[in-house]
Amino acid sequence: MTATAMTTAALRLLIALLLVAAPAECLPLRARGRWIVDEATGLRVKLACVNWPGHLEPGLPEGLNRLPVTTIAHTISSLGFNCVRLTYSIQMVTEKSYTEATVGQTFAQLNLTEPASGIERNNPGFLQLGHVAAYDSIVAALAEAGVMVILDNHVSKPKWCCAVDDGNGFFGDSYFDPRLWQRGLGLMATHFNNTPNVVAMSLRNELRGNRSTSARWSKYMQRGAATVHEANPNVLVVLSGLHFDTILSFLPVLPVTLPFKEKIVYEGHWYSFGVPWHDGLPNDICLNETSRFKDNIGFLTSSINGTAAPLFVSEFGIDQRYVNDNDNRYLNCILAFLAEEDVDWALWTMGGSYYYRSDKEPVQDFEETYGFFNRDWSRIRNPDFISRLKEIQQPIQDPYLSPGPYYQIIYHPASGLCVESSIGNTIHLGSCQSVRSRWNYDASVEGPIGLMGSSSCISTQGNGLPAIMTEKCSAPNNTLWSTVSSGQLQLGTRVFDEDGKEKWMCLDGSRSPLITTTECICITDSHCYPNQNPEKQWFKVITTNKQLLHQL
């Protein structure tokens, strides 16, 4: 290898490492088209975050009664998250009952004796801190663990969020004074102005209610954004949508006109709520819900009046016990979307319990089954779920090195892995970053799925048998693949039985990590029995331009 080639290879390796995370010295960030990048180098920084709630009545991020803050911060980092969406209330920085109180005094007022004892045991000194000072310590612990922070104004009055009529929903509601809100945003932006790992501020969580209109959204959100930017021009400013952060479709006709567009990011939420994911063809439901999200919010990554913008899916999540069938079916669909669109995201949530939650009636130690910690924070609730996030924590697209595209990965949302060629002649579920998970395939036509850099392609041996690699890639059947479902999530090849009857065989990850081919299910009503679920046959073909990163 020549000296020039060695230098180029070293540079590519450095860039590959930088793309995984953004240490504090690489900040601040900015928007460049649909991507978030390091302001100094232009390298992409993908936000793979987890929510850490602190907006409830105690005015303190959850879990400090269970674990030392440094343990929580390093657990977040060790699980592959490079960012925390840290929530807070406006009253925490504007009301004397919080600004003039210590954490210990607030906990005493709420009769939180047992949680307070746990905080003193696990985090000595925290009870004597003011609320903002406690946030300082938490942000510092996250910085030491290499974790970025997005400060999220979740509510004005500290309480559980969200209900349509809870008084926290929209500008002018009983607890939502726009002037006080702007003041609170300015105070937080100023306070964290010289804190490098605070990379963004989200203006408000889940705007909602009868008062909400796009015109009022435009008026007040732009005022709030300007307040934050004036106080702290380094941070990204994150704008949420209407109707519980699910609607931004008004932006093409009512665009944001702020002069600092390089600092503007939009956010959206997507949960399983309100959709019967088990009622109908799973492929059709996923297609319809994905299309709805794209129409309402996801279009931002393509264009707003000719200009794309970053999209931060700042909340998604499930009951991590895997007991909610609606959640389980939705999860495979949203993972396919997050992988294909390669957007920034934040999981709801981290904590397995709350000090105090009063959405219906006051309850101490309320369990949060959407949290990745279990109830007493002693272990990870569901390691399998966390493992399914690993591949989408990494950048899939690279806007810096090359315009691409160069090859395809084939992502399996039920496992969170990709189709990878084995050393033998089979294929299995493995790393999406591997050189053996790079394929040449045009999903728009029927054709072979070829391993990049080889003459081999994927073939079926029959129903229930392992899929194999073959060099007979022009055969009339067995090696020509199509996306055979409405949502383009099943890859099938035509086969004929001994009577000449045509069938479709689909790639199947049911015997993970081995990939087999089985008869395609649920591609039409006639192929789908009640309660049948094709999720193990779901594979999303994703074109990526990260070729240069793997040619080292």
Image (cartoon, rainbow, N blue to C red):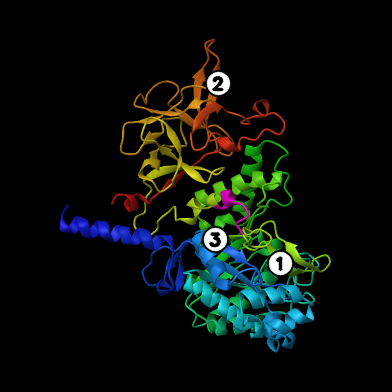
Asked if residue 156 is positioned above or below residue 366 in the image, the reply reads below
Asked if residue 225 is positioned above or below residue 389 in the image, the reply reads below
Mark 3 lies on residue: 311
Total marks shown come to 3
Q: Secondary structure at mark 3?
A: strand
Residue lying at 48% horizontally and 34% vertically, measured from the top left: 514
Mark 2 lies on residue: 503
x then y, percent, for residue 18: 38, 63
Asked if residue 42 is positioned above or below residue 125 in the image, the reply reads above
Q: CA distance from mark 1 to mark 3?
A: 29 Å
Of residues 526 and 172, the one drawn nearer to the viewer in this rendering: 526
The quarter holding residue 367 reads: bottom right
Residue lying at 68% horizontally and 65% vertically, measured from the top left: 206
Question: Neighbour class for label 1 at 10 Å: few (<14), some, many (≥20)?
Answer: many
Q: CA distance from mark 1 to mark 2?
A: 52 Å
Q: CA distance from mark 2 to mark 3?
A: 40 Å
Residue lying at 49% horizontally and 44% vertically, measured from the top left: 417
Q: Which mark is residue 354?
A: 1
Range covered by the magenta-colored residues: 379-386
x then y, percent, for residue 412: 52, 42
- Magenta stretch: residue 449 in it? no
Of residues 176 and 348, the one drawn nearer to the viewer in this rendering: 348
x then y, percent, for residue 422: 39, 36
- Magenta stretch: residue 382 in it? yes
